[in-house]
Image (tube, rainbow, N blue to C red):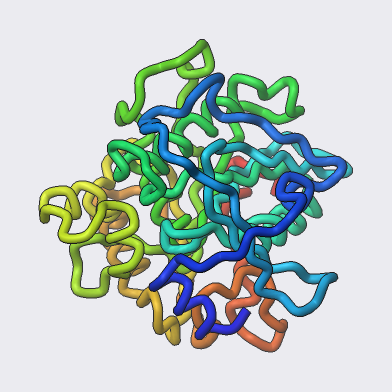
Amino acid sequence: MTGMNRRAALIAAAGLAVMPGLASAQAGATDEVIDLWPGTPPGDTGATIVRRIDDQSKDAARPDRWVTGIDRPVLIVRRPARANGAAMLVVPGGGYGFLSYDNEGTSQANWLNARGITAFILLYRLPGEGWTRREDVPLQDAQRAMRIIRARAVHFGVDASRVGVLGFSAGGHLAGSLATRHGETVYHPVDAADRQNARPDVAGLVYPVVSLDAPFTHGGSRDNLLGANAPEAMCRARSVERRVDPATSPVFLVHASDDGLVPPANSISLFQAMEAARRPVALHIFEDGGHGFGVRLPRTMQAAAWPGLFATFAARHGLVPA
């Protein structure tokens, strides 16, 4: 996927082609698919939502699927061969207009599994696809996902006290929102799982959208989440750096200085807010990498080092063995 392709998609987030075998295309033979909601998700309006997938890759061995039409939000569970008890909720980006399923989903699950971490890829609803209270729809799914992981920890073979979140681009905004707003009521409880804590034990934010009211805001993500011309108060309330408090999770931030789509000022603003609140935080800004690099950079590029740095941060905060 080229930077220009991703830039165009983040701006337009439209025009994706329907492909056959949608369910099998997203979940592997050994994956477990978990519905987030026992019935209709909150905010349903009866709108017709059709699942669509567009593969950006020209190499069948390295798919790069973008997903829209999420009427049924799910967790795709990817288990390691030798689990160490840690779990990671993986949140793909896509400007809140699509989900970058492979680059920021399955590719992340692969390296997490290699380190013994059970990965839960979140296919969350997109706010512009016909839901009421669109501004809360992704966070509803993220909170619910964390609660399901903890409620079914024994089934998944994970430790409920070692559950992190890892988000990318707009998915980084969602992961940051979960780290800061985990206790905010954005939906009515539907079953016993909703008694669980939604706070991630560690939050990794990779080239994240952070602020929705600053000059460096990624306008496409803001408008896809809140709608065009959202009130200033709504933008401020959903700017991650403004929601940091003493209960905010430890945060690990990664950006490239040459990111021309989501400027590193986003990560810097959250780092400063975490520092001011005396919350645990690490920030890594690399010279090169651009936007949307996932874990596919060659080792000659500095930003390729981020997964190892995140693993060290997670170990420092008790998520994984040192």
Residue 294 lies, with reference to residue 112, above or below; the image says: below
Q: Position of residue 299 (x, y in %)?
A: 72, 82
Q: Position of residue 266 (x, y in %)?
A: 33, 68
Q: Which residue extends farthest left?
A: 232
Q: Quadrant of residue 248?
A: top left
Q: Quadrant of residue 19?
A: bottom right
Q: Is residue 60 left or right of residue 286?
A: right
The reply to whether residue 104 is in sight is: no
Q: Nearer the viewer, residue 278 or 202?
A: 202
Q: Residue at x 53, y 87 (%)?
A: 288
Task: Count the numbered circles shown.
Answer: 0
Q: Position of residue 185 (x, y in %)?
A: 31, 26
Q: Residue at x 44, y 81 (%)?
A: 259
The reply to whether residue 20 is in sight is: yes
Q: Residue at x 19, y 67 (%)?
A: 214
Q: Nearer the viewer, residue 177 or 5?
A: 5
Q: Quadrant of the N terminus?
A: bottom right
Q: Position of residue 148 (x, y in %)?
A: 58, 26
Q: Residue at x 60, y 37 (%)?
A: 74
Q: Quadrant of residue 8?
A: bottom left
Q: Nearer the viewer, residue 275 or 168?
A: 168
